[in-house]
Image (tube, grey):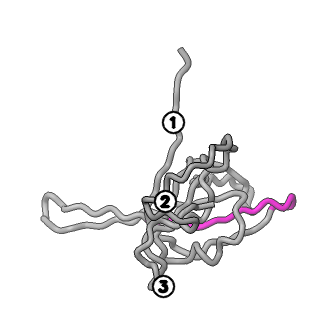
Amino acid sequence: MASRSINKVILIGHLGRDAETRFTPAGVAVTKFSVATNRRWKDQQTGEWKEETDWANVVLWRQENLANYLTKGKQVYVEGRLQTRNYDDKDGKKQYVTEVVAEDVLLLGGRGGEAGAEAGPQPVSMPRSAQRSQPAQPAEDHGADQGITDDDVPF
């Protein structure tokens, strides 16, 4: 029997800096940003609340025009996988970097005081599941009695 493994990361946190998008020599967009996640617990010996912040570097491939959305302080949901790469620094010493390679990124919460701030998560990248080609469905009006409009469809 073949062994199985899972490499899946789900983060909900706040952006530590504005996202930066650059392009490879082949013209592929690479967006990088950091996400802070907090953990809070009560110290059993002192009874004091303690808090710890962890930072994750995130890389998102093939998504352009995100700088207006992925800005410092915004809360995001990130789903992807861990990847470790290495390189030689200027002194020739091997350096290792572990990053989250994002597959899905969603903005959480409102839009910072704009009208409609009660709206749910706002996708900034199309989920991989939605990018697969789907067979055409027969046209039926299932949403007419539920108040669903064209504005509710994410694509």
First in sequence: mark 3 vs mark 1? 1
How far apart are the alpha carbons under marks 2 and 1?
41 Å
Is 29 inside the magenta-drawn segment? yes
Q: Which mark, by number, is residue 144?
A: 2
**Magenta region, main secondary structure:** strand
- Asked if residue 57 can be seen in this view, the reply is no
Residue beneath disc 1: 6
Mark closer to the observer (2, 1) = 2
Q: Position of residue 75 (x, y in %)?
A: 46, 70
Q: Is residue 101 above or below residue 115?
A: above
Q: Residue furthest top?
A: 1
Magenta stretch bounds:
24-36
Q: Quadrant of residue 43?
A: bottom left
How far apart are the alpha carbons under marks 3 and 1?
39 Å
Q: Position of residue 90 (x, y in %)?
A: 75, 63
Q: Secondary structure at mark 1?
A: loop
Q: Secondary structure at mark 2?
A: helix
Residue beneath disc 3: 114
Q: Amino acid at mark 2?
A: Ala
Q: Is residue 123 left or right of residue 116?
A: right
**Residue depicted at 48% across the width and 61% down the height:** 77
Mark closer to the observer (3, 1) = 3
Residue nearest the viewer, comparing 96 with 36: 36
Q: Position of residue 79 (x, y in %)?
A: 52, 53
Q: Amino acid at mark 1?
A: Ile
For the C terminus, the image quarter is bottom right
First in sequence: mark 2 vs mark 1? 1
Determine whether label 3 and label 1 are within 8 Å by CB: no
Pointer 1: residues within 10 angstroms few (<14), some, or many (20+)? few
**Residue depicted at 49% across the width and 59% down the height:** 144
Q: Quadrant of residue 12?
A: bottom left
